[in-house]
Image (tube, rainbow, N blue to C red):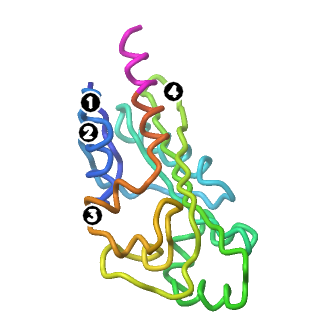
Amino acid sequence: MKITYVTGNWAKVQSAKEKLEPYGIEIDNIKLDIREIQADDVESIAKFSAEEARDLLHTNVLKNDTGFFVEALGGFPGPYAHYADDTIAEDGILKLMEGVENRRAYFKEAFAYAKVDGETKVFVSVTPGTIALEKSGTYGWSWDFIFIPDSQNKTLANFDDSIRFSLWNTDGYNELAKYLIDEAKK
């Protein structure tokens, strides 16, 4: 079984291969410029993008969207994480969090699988953690420098790719794999 992951992000492709290929699901990818709607939830964004990509490519596709949600900021930046990274970045979030006790945050990844026959399923992974008091680490990018996963005591940026990727919740990938395997049996 083979699916096309619509992304130009090498880290997303590597992660998908690591999580799905052991189930016999081959991943190829294509970088494709498609519209991304503005919405308050990553599930809607991923679903819209996957359906548009499917309609353009005429094949089954996988598309994901990730949000970064900070509880004390009412969920900001949420699905606008890319925009917030481009504008206020990690330093801006740290500034907004000065003196704030509740430092809980999480990444939410929505994986939308759009079948060529029109059906789209969305699978979600949530990686909980906290916002550090200051940036640290040398690996990764963006929020990795300020996000501490629940299972750790230092930011994601303190871990090389092989370890950092293993710290992400994989429920969405596992549910997607189960769905694809069940679909192949039909």
Pointer 1 or 4: first along the chain: 1
Q: Which residues are magenta?
A: 178-186
Pointer 4 or 2: first along the chain: 2
Q: Return the x and y of residue 108 as percentages of the image width and height.
A: 56, 55
- Residue 183, above or below 51: above
Q: Viewed as shown, does residue 74 lie left or right of 127? A: right
Residue 168 badge = none
Identified by mark 2, the residue type is Ile
Give the residue drawn at x 55%, y 43%.
Answer: 124
Q: Viewed as shown, does residue 58 lie left or right of 108? A: left
Identified by mark 1, the residue type is Lys
Query: Which residue is disc 3 drawn over?
Result: 161
Q: How far, Cα to Cα, is label 1 from label 2?
A: 6 Å
Pointer 1 or 2: first along the chain: 1
Identified by mark 4, the residue type is Gly
Q: Is residue 183 magenta?
A: yes
Q: Are marks 1 and 2 in contact (CB under 8 Å)?
A: yes
Query: Which residue is disc 1 drawn over?
Result: 2
Query: Which residue is disc 4 drawn over?
Result: 118
Q: How far, Cα to Cα, is label 3 from label 1?
A: 25 Å
Label 4 sits on a secondary structure element that is loop
Q: Return the x and y of residue 34 as percentages of the image width and height.
A: 44, 55
Pointer 3 or 1: first along the chain: 1
Q: How far, Cα to Cα, is label 1 from label 4?
A: 17 Å
Query: Which residue is disc 2 drawn over?
Result: 27
Q: Viewed as shown, does residue 76 lie left or right of 16? A: right
